[in-house]
Image (cartoon, rainbow, N blue to C red):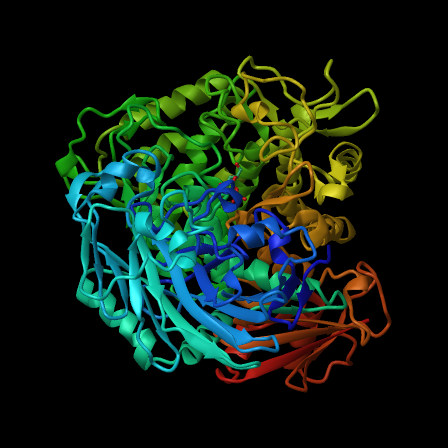
Amino acid sequence: MKGYKYLDKKGTFELENPELTSYLYFPICNESGVMSSLTPTFGGDSKMGQNTFLLSPVSSEDLHNNKSSRNFWCYIKGKGIWSATGRSSKQQAELFTECKDETKLEAGVLWQKVTRTSKQFGITSEITSFVPHTKHKSELMIVKLKNSGKENLDITPTAAIPLYGRSADNIRDHRHVTSLLHRIETVETGVILNPTLTFDERGHQENQVVYGVFGRTSDGELPAGFYPCTEEFIGEGGSFENPRAISEENIVPVEKGIIIEGYEALGGIQFKNIILEPMEEKTYILVLGYGDSKEELMKEADYFLSQMPWEKAFIDMKKYWDEKLNIEFGSGKKDFDPWMYWVSFQPILRRIYGCSFLPHHDYGKGGRGWRDLWQDCLALLMMNPDGVKEMLIDNFSGVRMDGTNATIIGRNQGEFIADRNNITRVWMDHGVWPFLTTKLYIMQRGDVEILLKENYYFKDPQCMRGEEIDHLWKQEDGNHVRTNEGLEYKGSILEHMLIQHLTSFYDVGEHNHIRLRGADWNDALDMAKERGESVAFTALYGENLNQIGELILNLYQKGFKKIALAKELEILLEDDCKVYEDIHKKQEILSRYCEQCKSRISGEKLFISSLDLAGNLKNKGGWIKKHIRETEWITNEEGHSWYNGYYDNRGNAVEGDSPTGVRMILTGQVFTIMSDTAVTEQVKEIISSADAYLYDPDIGGYKLNTNFKELKTDLGRMFGFAYGQKENGAVFSHMAVMYANALYQRGFAKEGYKVIDTLYRHSSNFEKSRIYPGIPEYIGGNGRGLYHYLTGAASWLLLTVLTEMYGVKGHYGDLKLSPKLTLEQFDDNQEAYVKFPFADKKLLVVYHNPLKKEYGEYQIKSIFINGKLYCNYNNPVITENQSHLDNLCLDGIILRKDIEALDSIMEHKIIVELI
Ligand code: G1P
């Protein structure tokens, strides 16, 4: 088996015999809500949400099990039946024989084309699928048939696309009864399905969504007839891969204007019989669509069938996505660059699909979690900073006054929904992510004042950090915290972040680390609610406290000498080491604070000196790190050392030697390194331990944990998963990438590069990973990439490659260039480049390393902007202003004002000479 080959720098690739690999799926979608998945043989599904599936929902196993697909049949007189998508029983049976069709897939952002040639039939099909990027709610499938043989072909073409038209809930629950709701109608160009009612978790409601499949030839010919009903099309004993309507002449299509009630629907469209001479072609346009009404649906289908040439819609769509993707990398690793193109696109996919709507993602109903919401913003911030400010501020309204947050995220920006569970789940890591994203924003834009912008707090019946119910809260009060006077209370973004961090600071378990509660980043550490502690994320809270302190100092320098905070916060600002050491005192403080905010709050503000507040936070952050250093550094019998990252529900440390073998988890290492808790010598020892216990180059690098060989019901369900899968010891891309990020941040570029390079090489080795280009959520024990496309790993990888590897970072609004590229990443001209937007300008930064120096040996010598020397570290001082710039050169800084002065339309080339 051969892998795929890139055709350009924009990630376009081709792959021969794609159907000989199982579980492949490709996303095509738009921002109007169409979310489809496509297999190489046009299986997969299409939906706009949990309750509106146009094609029946598929999970990964259905990809090989399901006979429902976007089929296109050719009845060839004198020869038999052939599926242009490869989905006939005969073609399936011949898959591993010499008679197999020749197939090739070509795909790019966001389209798929499959070319299929049958020597037996002398016919070739070329099928292109995409979703127009416009406001339309349609998927287009363009089928080109070509006579690739020597004789004339007499063909009767028929599209056969089963229409499901209901909620995913009904795939088994009331599947038949909901078919009785179906009202199916044939119109001039296709088949419409308009169910009367919907039966799903929302109860019985009048249906609002109309579905349909429509077609015409590219030269405008109308269909000749229709097969609107599954039963009749497949015939007794037949199936979608062996339909009797295609092979038997007595099952004739119906005309337009027919209405059928109460059956499973089929978008079956028969076209006029054609004679194709050798080399002659014929193209059919199919539109699969959703509408709010029959009229709207037909109007949209007509638009693509008669007005807008599909070629134009296709080109416009490609251009649209290409413009969205405004980051591009160039290096000596040619295939790494187009692979990164896909990685950069993945955060956009997760914004559209959420975490539920591709075949592996068969959980949830479409929403994203709190952590995902914030991390997806990282990539958006780098690609399209406009509008992100509002998004950040809006998202803070999900924070509760007790430091926890809403967990049900609405469809609209800043919309959070009350959790009506008796007691909700609290993830202890949730507080750290908003700060990381906000900090990136501040550094990119220099807008530290965003911290003073105000927003509401989220209110629902949950209080006391998920331990109690506020019986005083009434639905009429709405979802904002109110003051005793009944007014909706607003606090600054800084106050929101402080509440998240300070409540966590006091929320400690027996070992004085922050309690694990419902879980941390690892969702599957969910069985240690009472006594579990996450040292890993305690470390990150520690560094965040420190950095919030830094930001407050910056505010101070800008003249904000005092900060207004809700009066209730006063007790959390205790700054006494004796209290920090005293677990009971801490718990008591937290409980007093939460009690005050249980229902309503005073609305009174406290004004605190910025300097005092910054010092206070830094003391807390410093204490956390010191405490972890003093208590959690472990050395095992083999002489390896690393940090213990967890305590289980029996209060025992989780990592170290055990009767079943060495127990080590990557998470605790990542965050002690990232937070500067691990001192440099310790980082070196951690790297060596991770290499000894977690590294496996055959499956993409660093695994999440060693095999505990125990069903640890005192820690989490992850231990029920097979070892090597998902959160139990897979190479889990997100954590591996965060490990790389942490290493780069600490100056361990060679080691960070190794993490990314191993992951990249495995993911893009198709024979092993069996996925299209991009980064999967994890790599299973057998090397297969799983849960492709929708993963937070993509945002973090883009962040890491851009800001650490290429060292392109905002620094309070200025641009800081600090490359950490290794020598092998420079191309033959000793160059590596990155294109990205900054300060609303298009920049191209080229690093030139003529002396072929390795990372650690080179430094910046001079910076040129559009051919003009900007600064030169080794230059004799020319003017006072120039000497100032030359100092900046040493730090790789280009002042924001100098970038802002550049023209907004053209791309600006910044050459950075290394010495
Ligand atoms: C997924 C979830 C993420 C969670 C992780 C580990 O990772 O989306 O929130 O932290 O599993 O349980 P992802 O798919 O983003 O890689």
Residue at (56%, 61%) from the top-left corner?
344
**Is residue 35 placed above or below 879 in the rendered structure?**
above
Query: Nearest the camera: 721 or 629?
Result: 721
**Is residue 189 placed above or below 202 in the rendered structure?**
below
**Is residue 595 placed above or below 419 in the rendered structure?**
above
Does residue 768 appear in this view? yes
Q: Where is residue 843 in the image (x, y as percent from the top left)?
A: 58, 76
The number of callouts visible is: 0
- Identity of the residue furthest to the bottom in this view: 867
The answer to whether 364 appears left or right of 468 in the picture is: right
Residue at (58%, 67%) from the top-left corner?
121
Residue at (78%, 22%) from the top-left corner?
636
Query: Nearest the camera: 194 or 786?
Result: 194
Quadrant of the snapshot with the C terminus: bottom right
Query: Nearest the camera: 495 or 424?
Result: 424
The answer to whether 295 appears left or right of 16 in the picture is: left
Image quadrant of residue 834? bottom right
Quadrant of the snapshot with the N terminus: bottom right
**Is residue 35 placed above or below 847 in the rendered structure?**
above
Q: Where is residue 384 in the image (x, y as percent from the top left)?
A: 46, 66
Q: Position of residue 346 (x, y in %)?
A: 52, 57
Does residue 442 appear in this view? no
Q: Position of residue 371 (x, y in %)?
A: 45, 43
Residue at (74%, 81%) from the top-left corner?
877
Image quadrant of residue 833? bottom right
